[in-house]
Amino acid sequence: QKEVEQDPGPLSVPEGAIVSLNCTYSNSAFQYFMWYRQYSRKGPELLMYTYSSGNKEDGRFTAQVDKSSKYISLFIRDSQPSDSATYLCAMRDYGGSQGNLIFGKGTKLSVKP
Amino acid sequence: GAGVSQSPSNKVTEKGKDVELRCDPISGHTALYWYRQRLGQGLEFLIYFQGNSAPDKSGLPSDRFSAERTGESVSTLTIQRTQQEDSAVYLCASSHDLNKGELFFGEGSRLTVL
């Protein structure tokens, strides 16, 4: 079993839809959870960063962490064509090398006008 | 520059040749990372530098891979005797505040080994 599982998609939705992206993980030591967005032929950029279980909201984006289920989600409200990208979850534990973020494979999202 | 700069952006080489990839991090960022991203795959950690501490090389896949960093500036990733399975995008990232989990990535060096 891989440490981080993420459905690669592709996921295609109409403009304005609510998008739900998810990752599951197996390592209960993971404490820090991130979502990165990667446009085609670009490097990833940080969207959301969470530490504890619960929800964190930033504009149209909501990150949700459920440590008991080892499950994290990213919700995008009122999705726009400009949201079309690959979304990667990332996580690391507290005691391990701070350099070693574990990334999911990424989910490719397409928002159709 | 304002962001992480990587060169070359594209490199095509023949199997068995050595390649060198360069990363210029954001000024003032003490942490620097190299990741590999194969087509359709996630990011694979290779190596991490933090200030003057010994680098974390735990992700390097073989002894053909090595990386250096001079102080808190430029880093080079060297792949010796390249193989076709080395074909990937090599991403460099830098960070100044690991507590925020934010890595700033360059656009990557796309390596194709024929």
Image: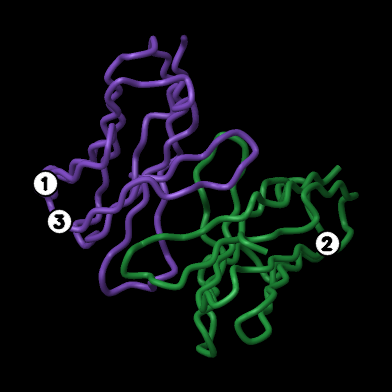
Q: Is residue B47 above or below residue B108?
A: below
Q: Which chain is purple?
A: A
Nearer mark to the viewer, of 3 and 2: 3
Along the horizontal axis of the image, is B11 left or right of A65? Answer: right
* Residue A52's disc number: 3
Badge 3 crowding class, 10 Å Cα cut-off, few under 14, some 14 to 19, many 20 or more, is some
Mark 3 and mark 1 residues within 8 Å of each other at the beta carbon: yes
The answer for which chain carries disc 3 is A
* Colour scheme: by chain
Mark 1 and mark 2: span between their CA atoms? 45 Å
Residue A75's place in the image compared with B64, above or below, is above
Name the chain letter of the residue that bears numbered label 2: B
Q: Are marks 3 and 2 on the same chain?
A: no
Rendering colour (chain B): green
- What residue does disc 2 label? B19
Secondary structure found at label 3? loop
Lateral position of residue B113 relative to residue B59, left or right: right
Give the mark toward the camera: 1 or 2: 1
Residue A16 location, quadrant: top left
Which secondary structure, mark 2? strand
**Residue B10 spot, x, y in % from top left:** 80, 47
Q: Amino acid at mark 3?
A: Ser
- Check disc 2 and give the amino acid type: Val
Q: Residue at x 53, y 39 (%)?
A: B41
The residue at which mark 1 appears reads as A54
**Mark 1 residue type:** Gly
Give the alpha-carbon distance from disc 3 to disc 1, as whole Å.
Answer: 6 Å
Residue at horizontal 44%, vertical 69%? A99
